[in-house]
Amino acid sequence: MGDRQNRADVILIGAGIMSATLGTMLKELAPDLDIIVLERRSQPGEESSNEWNNAGTGHASLCELNYTTEKADGSIDISKAVKVNEEFQLSRQFWSYLVRRGLIRDPQKFIMPVPHMSFVQGERDVAFLKKRFEAMSANPLFEGMEFSDAPDKLAEWIPLMMENRTLDRPIAATRIESGTDVNFGALTRMLFAHLKNSGAQMLYHRHVQDMQRTTDGKWELKVRNVESGAVERYSAPFVFIGAGGGSLHLLQKSGIAEGRGIGGFPVSGLFMVCRDPEMAKRHYAKVYGKAAIGAPPMSVPHLDTRFIDGKPSLLFGPFAGFTPKFLKFGSNLDLLKSVKPHNLVTMIAAGVKNMSLTTYLIKQLMLTKEQRVEELRQFVPHARSEDWDLIVAGQRVQIIKDTETGGRGTLQFGTEVISAADGSVAALLGASPGASTAVAIMLEVIKRCFPEQLKAWREKIGEMVPSWGIKLSENPDLVRELHEETAKTLGLDRSAHPARQYASTATS
Ligand SMILES: Cc1cc2nc3c(=O)[nH]c(=O)nc-3n(C[C@H](O)[C@H](O)[C@H](O)COP(=O)(O)OP(=O)(O)OC[C@H]3O[C@@H](n4cnc5c(N)ncnc54)[C@H](O)[C@@H]3O)c2cc1C
């Protein structure tokens, strides 16, 4: 490859949903930008963004109980739920913009309407859910949420979960029709296909090994071509490290001060999947329960309708686990290699503090299939082991850092953009709420790394994501208007949707 082609305005490391989103936005804002994408695998969306490596929940706080907390006075704090929902609205708006402009087609290949539900058992949790429902349904973002503790109603909503259920304690659920199942793998592939058509260079089998600043302030990347074994060099004034679990290593290689003292803790995941179309027809919802005591928030159990390649299936999990790899296709040395003199004390503190979590993860890892099916029976009382297969999901690398509130070695469960003060490089760490909020996260990257262009780009950003910078929860009319418009463009109107057949079977 000639030297000229190895230079670009922007280099995106990793071909997951985050780089796909950032690249697509930048191309809309500045069509002349030269973009190179470097990906170690043979195609986009092979790690966490792959459809079988995540749960495909369009996280909009419509069902995730861990996004709300009960305060000391008994009231419910919904601020995180509001924030996540507002961020998801930006994703919906951006996807709608792309569909409207014909830049991506067939939204049904990546987004389907699936009601979102929260499900609890026992008096205390039922009382919590009721209070939570009252707090949330008063907010325009959660309009249409319903609550029921009546077994007949629940049997209508979730027949598969109510069949053969012993009703020896109170149960309740909330339900909202406007939830979604998102195939982030398909979306990632669509966005990269569009980027390639727009002139971006998509280079696969390229493993970025190192990055250094050159005297002219640019970044030079040392890249191994994993097919030929050759070492190649690429340079650009701006680099986005969207390498998922691989981002921490590259951030450390960059040597920027903002990356010091940060560590990573890998959590693996397993799902159980049922591909029997008849079973899938009897459950049409994403039903989130409560995490077991001592379990990390990302292991909240849920039973989901998934639509992948037009076929419905059921997914249950995730079961957390531990491997030292930072990527599904990573190395057993990943964790060890991430320990540096500058994060050693933080990592040791995190290790001591999180002994119980490590024990929990190891116990989870050792569960037999029958024990996992037993957990599934909390959701599907008559589940049979032979109907369900185990699949390995993606790796999540949780951020470890020292914080004012948590002290040394605090484990973080969110995502965080780490960028250099001069905006020449940004990395995304962490995995939750993840892909659903990719647009909000990448807008943050743009804000930090392209401050000089932002003024000129504001109008276009407003066209792509009309509610950026607006508190939607305080603008009920705008919520309704944007919701209706995006539902129409993305084909989420359930009355005319192919998914409707599942709805009618499940509730008949
Ligand atoms: C079990 C599980 C369930 C989840 N469920 C949901 C959900 O329901 N909803 C939701 O919104 N989010 C969910 N997430 C989170 C979501 O999957 C991630 O936030 C999102 O996919 C991350 O995208 P990414 O582009 O940052 O990383 P990835 O998709 O992992 O992409 C990173 C890419 O970088 C490449 N790469 C790595 N290192 C290098 C290198 N050195 N050189 C070149 N290339 C490199 C990798 O091969 C990969 O292709 C879940 C995650 C997991 C693991």
Image (tube, rainbow, N blue to C red):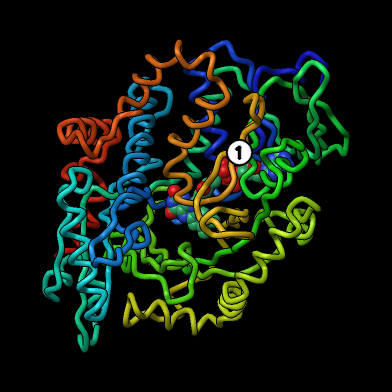
Q: Quadrant of the C terminus?
A: bottom left
Q: Is residue 422 above or below residue 53?
A: above
Residue at the limit of the structure toward the right, as seen here: 230
User: Looking at the image, which is closer to me, 222 or 377?
Assistant: 222
Looking at the image, which residue is at 24% across and 83% down?
A: 165
Q: Is residue 44 visible?
A: no
Q: Quadrant of residue 243?
A: top right
Q: Is residue 135 left or right of residue 238?
A: left
Q: Is residue 215 above or below residue 292?
A: above
Task: Give the percent coordinates (x, y) of residue 198.
Answer: 55, 18
Task: Give the percent coordinates (x, y) of residue 441.
Answer: 48, 37
For label 1, the SS is strand
Q: Quadrant of the N terminus?
A: top right
Q: Is residue 354 above or below residue 137?
A: below
Task: Give the percent coordinates (x, y) of residue 121.
Answer: 26, 78
Does mark 1's beta carbon lie closer than 8 Å to ligand 1? no
Looking at the image, which residue is at 36% across and 41% down?
A: 88
User: Looking at the image, which is closer to me, 37 or 320?
Assistant: 320
Q: Is residue 301 above or below residue 385?
A: above
Q: Quadrant of residue 466?
A: top left
- Amino acid type, callout 1: Ile
Q: Is residue 301 left or right of residue 381?
A: right
Task: Give the percent coordinates (x, y) of residue 371.
Answer: 49, 84
Looking at the image, which residue is at 20% across and 73% down?
A: 127
Looking at the image, which residue is at 35% across and 28% down?
A: 469
Label 1 Cα neighbours within 10 Å, binned few <14 / some 14-19 / many ≥20: many
User: Looking at the image, which is closer to me, 10 or 224?
Assistant: 10
Q: Is residue 288 left or right of residue 196?
A: left
User: Looking at the image, which is closer to me, 369 or 86?
Assistant: 86
Q: Which residue is mark 1?
A: 418
Count up the numbered dots: 1
Q: Is residue 155 visible?
A: yes
